[in-house]
Image (cartoon, coloured by chain):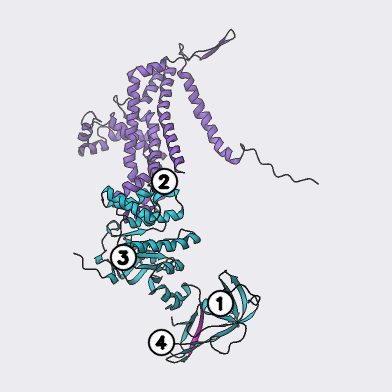
């Protein structure tokens, strides 16, 4: 009998290492995933996220470490005996089989009676709204429809764990945005625990309840999308997720309730203590949307910098300004266009002051 | 002032593309269609004392065309020809099957071999072509004759019992001039023609499909039958045609390795031509042979094209 599963530790990844002839693609990774969670492994190509996913699916064998799903150690189980299913990046739909047969493929392998197979296929086809395409072959479908067939096929066996490899990677931008929400809705409707791999931070942020940012085979940070965005742990994470202004400086005042960090162009007043020492080199990360622009010099000497508008990109709902600072460095500032364009809008060559609040920055020590 | 005219393009039928396609077609026209028409003409000609008579003659301002169809009637009524056609089809089919059974796993593992090894394996498949086909078939004579080491090995392994039971050899330990030696020879000769199209097909197989099949619970064996084999259908068909078609009309191998039992249509044509000195009869046999192969092939191609069309 399998021991009663702990819902918070539905999937346990313990000390997993994958060594490809001296190169550690995955380097000592630990992770617990709760039941019903949508978890994203986020990183650029070659960071080891796909290797980790393939070890979960059973296509790669970990060099060391254990993977435990719902109390069951997956070691030694070939892919075809694992109680999980994967949606492949390229969908990997069987070109010679109809949509219906593609979805029924896994169910037939389980030796289910025909009537039950029929019911399940109809149910998932309905779930992905492809009922009338059942008789078509994959190449007769659009990219978005193929994606839904792939999803239906991986859900048909009602797996304990669903793996998504770059689920929307093959779709164009517009379709991707629509599909993100739809995909999450379907996964939540089914209630399956899900691990997805993506290099697209937007995709990870919209779809996942938690994200692990990976680089060089390690987890740099694991947290909710909000945590990762607002309180990145390292320079790499701050830079990888969204746009950020990174300024290097040193700690000049180190108090329990505030610190002051001196950078080349400005001084930062940070409204909370940090774990650091006086004189320590740190980086200050400042998101472009947390900066305000004004023409007049502000009263405070802190959290303000002057620059000239060098570039201006209008995106409709917001505008991104690139200011050239005295040191020659650039500062990105994005402003929501909450009113319609006015005559006094900042434009190229304007000298403007950028200001921000004491709680806007993140001080990074690594 | 002159108005610049756009450079006139060559007429549609004289572009580079047409020439590239056209030259092989001209070749086929000159060396395949024309000879076939000559054979067709022979098949309805009458035989004179020594030479074949013309089918048409002009006398007194009147053109008379005489088409003799008696040869065809004779072929259709005399059991000998029917037997020879059937045995040709049978041996060709068995050879195709043997080539497929040996060639498929071969091509499969070649396609799965390390990429750096594949050119070498491919060259080894083609290496036998460096020696004359005739010599290689002769070599089998030595190998299968009494005392030949393949013959000894087969006897030592008691394979001859099984072959005897299958009625492809006539006596224990005697392999030459039997159906067995014929099939061995033809399978050996035509194996590369099966392997090459299969290899080119199998090496294009998307291995992720096999991963997807495994992920959905298919054992490697099931995945092979349900994914690899159906997707290599085109390669199987191409290889089988390349083996089957020339095998039906095969003359040299049955002559060297076959026996009295293994009468094939190529032998009949030879006999009609050189022993009976009856070119019209030989031509008629050949025409029927071509029809026998071409008609099912054309039907098959039509079906394939329609299936392809239906997919669009």
Q: Are marks 1 and 4 in contact (CB under 8 Å)?
A: no
Please name whichever residue, A185 or A235, is drawn nearer the observer in this view of the structure: A185
The residue that disc 2 covers is B200
Which is closer to the viewer, label 1 or label 2? 1
Asked whether, in this view, residue A75 is left or right of residue A229, the answer is left
Residue lying furthest right: B1
The vertical placement of A339 against A45, above or below, is below
Comes first in the chain, label 1 or label 3: 3
Question: Given the image, what chain letter belongs to the residue carrying mark 3?
Answer: A
N-terminal label among 1 and 4:
4
- Horizontal and vertical percent position of residue B52: 48, 15
Number of residues whose C-alpha sits closer than 10 Å to that of mark 3, classed few (under 14), some (14–19) or many (20 or more): many
Q: Chain of mark 1?
A: A
User: Which chain is rendered purple in the image?
Assistant: B
Do marks 1 and 3 both belong to one polypeptide chain?
A: yes
Relative to B223, say whether B34 is above or below.
Answer: above
Q: Which hue is chain A drawn in? A: cyan
Q: CA distance from mark 1 to mark 2?
A: 56 Å
User: Marks 3 and 1: in contact by CB < 8 Å?
Assistant: no
Which span of residues is magenta-colored? A242-252
Which mark, by number, is residue A275? 4
Rendered-image quadrant of the C terminus of chain A: bottom left
Separation of residues labelled 4 and 2 (CA atoms): 63 Å
Look at 23% across and 28% down and name the residue there: B170
Left or right of residue A52: residue A269: right
* Mark 1 neighbour class, 10 Å CA radius: few under 14, some 14 to 19, many 20 or more: many
Circle 4: is it few (<14), some (14-19), or many (20+) Cα within 10 Å? few
Q: Which residue is mark 3?
A: A62
Q: Are marks 2 and 3 in contact (CB under 8 Å)?
A: no
């Amino acid at each position: 009998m399998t021991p009663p599963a702990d819902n918070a530790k539905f999937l346990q990844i313990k000390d997993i290492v994958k060594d490809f002839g001296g190169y550690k693609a995955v380097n000592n990774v630990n992770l617990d995933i709760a039941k019903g969670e949508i978890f994203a492994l986020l990183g650029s190509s070659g960071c080891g996220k796909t290797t980790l996913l393939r070890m979960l699916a059973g296509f790669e064998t970990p060099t060391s470490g254990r993977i435990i799903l719902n109390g069951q150690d997956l070691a030694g189980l070939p892919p075809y005996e694992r109680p999980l299913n994967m949606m492949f990046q390229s969908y990997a739909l069987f070109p010679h089989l109809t949509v219906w047969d593609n979805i029924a493929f896994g169910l037939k392998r389980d030796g289910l009676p025909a009537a039950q197979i029929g019911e399940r296929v109809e149910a998932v086809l309905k779930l992905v709204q492809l009922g009338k395409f059942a008789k078509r072959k994959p190449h007769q479908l659009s990219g978005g429809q193929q994606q839904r067939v792939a999803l239906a096929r991986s859900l048909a066996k009602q797996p304990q764990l669903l793996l998504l490899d770059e689920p929307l990677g093959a779709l164009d931008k517009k379709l991707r945005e629509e599909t993100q929400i739809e995909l999450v809705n379907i996964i939540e409707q089914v209630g399956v625990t899900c691990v997805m791999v993506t290099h697209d931070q937007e995709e990870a942020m919209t779809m996942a309840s938690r994200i692990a940012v990976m680089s060089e085979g390690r987890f740099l940070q694991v947290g909710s999308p909000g945590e990762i965005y607002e309180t990145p742990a390292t320079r790499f994470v701050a830079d990888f997720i969204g746009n950020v202004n990174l300024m290097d400086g040193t700690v000049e005042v180190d108090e329990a309730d505030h610190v002051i960090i001196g950078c080349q162009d400005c001084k930062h007043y940070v409204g909370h203590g940090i774990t650091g020492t006086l004189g320590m080199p740190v980086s200050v990360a400042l998101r472009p949307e947390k900066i305000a622009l004004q023409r007049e010099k502000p009263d405070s000497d802190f959290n303000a910098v002057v620059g000239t508008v060098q570039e201006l990109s209008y995106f409709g709902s917001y505008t991104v300004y690139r200011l050239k600072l005295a040191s020659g460095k650039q500062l990105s500032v994005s402003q929501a266009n909450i009113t319609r364009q006015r005559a006094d809008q900042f434009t190229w060559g304007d000298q403007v002051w950028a200001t921000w609040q004491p709680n806007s920055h993140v001080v990074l020590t690594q | 002032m002159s108005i610049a005219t756009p450079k006139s393009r060559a007429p549609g039928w004289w572009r580079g593309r047409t020439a590239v396609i056209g030259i092989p077609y001209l070749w086929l026209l000159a060396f395949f269609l024309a000879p076939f028409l000559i054979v067709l003409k022979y098949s309805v000609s009458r035989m004179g004392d020594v030479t074949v008579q013309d089918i048409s003659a002009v006398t007194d301002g009147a053109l008379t065309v005489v088409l003799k169809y008696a040869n065809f009637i004779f072929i259709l009524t005399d059991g000998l020809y029917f037997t020879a056609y059937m045995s040709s089809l049978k041996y060709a089919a068995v050879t195709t099957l043997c080539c497929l059974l040996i060639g498929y796993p071969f091509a499969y593992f070649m396609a799965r071999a390390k990429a750096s090894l594949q050119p070498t394996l491919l060259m080894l498949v083609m290496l036998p072509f460096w020696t004359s086909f005739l010599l290689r078939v002769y070599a089998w004579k030595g190998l299968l004759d009494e005392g030949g080491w393949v013959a000894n090995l087969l006897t030592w392994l008691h394979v001859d019992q099984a072959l005897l039971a299958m009625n492809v050899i006539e006596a224990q330990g005697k392999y030459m001039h039997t159906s067995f030696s014929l099939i061995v020879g033809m399978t050996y000769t035509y194996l590369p023609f099966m392997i090459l199209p299969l290899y080119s097909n199998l090496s294009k197989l998307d291995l992720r499909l096999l991963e997807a099949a495994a992920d959905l619970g298919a054992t490697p064996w099931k995945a092979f039958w349900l994914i690899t084999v159906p997707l290599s259908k085109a390669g199987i068909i191409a290889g089988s045609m390349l083996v089957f078609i020339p095998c039906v009309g095969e003359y040299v191998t049955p002559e060297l390795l076959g026996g009295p039992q293994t009468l094939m249509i190529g032998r009949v044509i030879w006999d009609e031509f050189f022993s009976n000195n009856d070119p019209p009869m030989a031509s008629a046999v050949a025409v029927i042979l071509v029809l026998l192969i071409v008609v099912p092939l054309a039907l098959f191609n039509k079906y394939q094209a329609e299936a392809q069309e239906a997919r669009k």
